[in-house]
Amino acid sequence: MKLKDILLEEIPYVSSDKIRQGLVRKHGSQELDSYTFGIELEFIPELSYKVDEDRLLSLLTHDIQFQSWADQHIQDERENLNRRWRGDVDSWDETFGPVDPDTWEAHNGEPQREDFDDDDSYSDAHDEWADKLKDVKWNYKYFSPSDFYEQVAQNLIRDDGWEEYVNREEVAKKDVDSGCNDAVRFIKGEMGQKVVFGDETTPDTWAVSPDGDNVEIRSKHLNQSEFGLVEDICSFVSNRNTSGGTSAHVHIGLPKDFDAFDLLAMSNLADEPSIKDSVGPERELSAYSRLRDSLHKTIITRILQEPKDQKTGEVPKEFVIKNDVIKHMMRSINRYHGTNIASIDIGTVEFRYFSSDIASESRRFIGWIKYFLILPKIAKTKNKVVLKGDRKLTCVREPGQIRFFLDKDTVKVSDLPSTDIKAAAEPETSSPPTETDPRIEKLRRLKDKLKSARKNIRT
């Protein structure tokens, strides 16, 4: 099978070795071999002895068994408290809970000085009355239905009686610091790599830091002779707690001549059916690694804002946007897609599809990294990309710009190599050309070919 027959919009994972061999035969191996990559792996740290009291209080107050016990408890306490006050308030119905402060004061007036023979007697009587009123207010507030569950739950937490209703593992805090320290020790000691505790990596330094309640490991810039380091870090992570929600991201470093059209082409290449089979049902794709249909809808909506008539809201069926404008647009795309093209800001395209469960199969993970590594070169060979969302948008490479066709089924494309189209946009010259310079004649020929190609596209 010829290379051009394999290179559909979506690059089949099963054919990735053949495709790479074909690219090497046609373009040589130097560029492909020079591509670098980076990985990010998360794991869930061990639980600590500390308890998240806010979460515990929430779980406890919403537990049905606890509520049932608390209902009986409040009934018993209200009756007991009312019996204590019956000597003062005979008319109070003990089935309704603690006497409210206003009712108690109505039946127990504040002592007046004129009713006492001396100041000491008055002071003692008033202190006793104030203490009783304070007690009444506290009990009435404590046993009011609006906050009773929370009050009783707080007492239960204080007295360590809550484990009858809530499992400790549900509320135990994760020991993120210990998890980070373990990772740092392994990378430095077992792998012999430079590593820092923090958010920022450098090209030759690994980094480890908390990511919410999890631990995240970020590699240095890796070249294709360092897959052994991927195996090493996978062996560490595979012995930790992972799930469909802990991520394994792959960043592919982009070549310097990667332009806006190449970036759009990258959005269309990943073999998502094979990826979905590989990650399994536990991976939370819809949350942090949305699939291509979501990405393309977002890209199309963003691009169509540029040529839209602000008065009528109409979008032309054909329009052109400069490369630098498109690149700026792509930086604002939400990063939570399986193919994250917004990471162009740091010179990469990020593939977010996998969870760190894949660390237990390091060879499979490396196979996918090698697959992602061929995609930038394929993107650079394309002259047409079709984005499909609620609308269909066909993108055609032109010198320094992209021509877009909205909802058009057939679009003619220049048969010039993509490298020639790029060269016509930004000719590389080591010195200013003169009229007799052979480079001038070459550029004229290219421009004539491109003019003819554009004419064919329009017709």
Image (tube, rainbow, N blue to C red):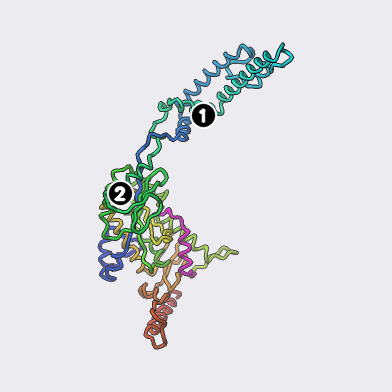
Residue 170 appears in the picture as rendered: no
* Boundaries of the magenta span: 319-337
Give the x, y percent position of residue 146: 56, 28
Q: Picture quarter containing residue 294?
A: bottom left
Q: Is residue 432 above or below residue 66?
A: below
Q: Residue at x 36, y 68 (%)?
A: 380
Please tell me which residue lies in front, 445 or 431.
431
Dot 1 corresponds to which residue? 150
Give the x, y percent position of residue 327: 45, 64
Please tell me which residue lies in front, 433 or 312.
433
State the mark number for residue 229: none
Dot 2 corresponds to which residue? 358
Q: Is residue 442 above or below residue 16?
A: below
Give the x, y percent position of residue 134: 61, 22
Please tell me which residue lies in front, 393 or 421.
421
Give the x, y percent position of residue 205: 34, 55
Please tell me which residue lies in front, 388 or 139.
139
Q: Residues within 10 Å of mark 2 (few under 14, many from 20)?
A: many
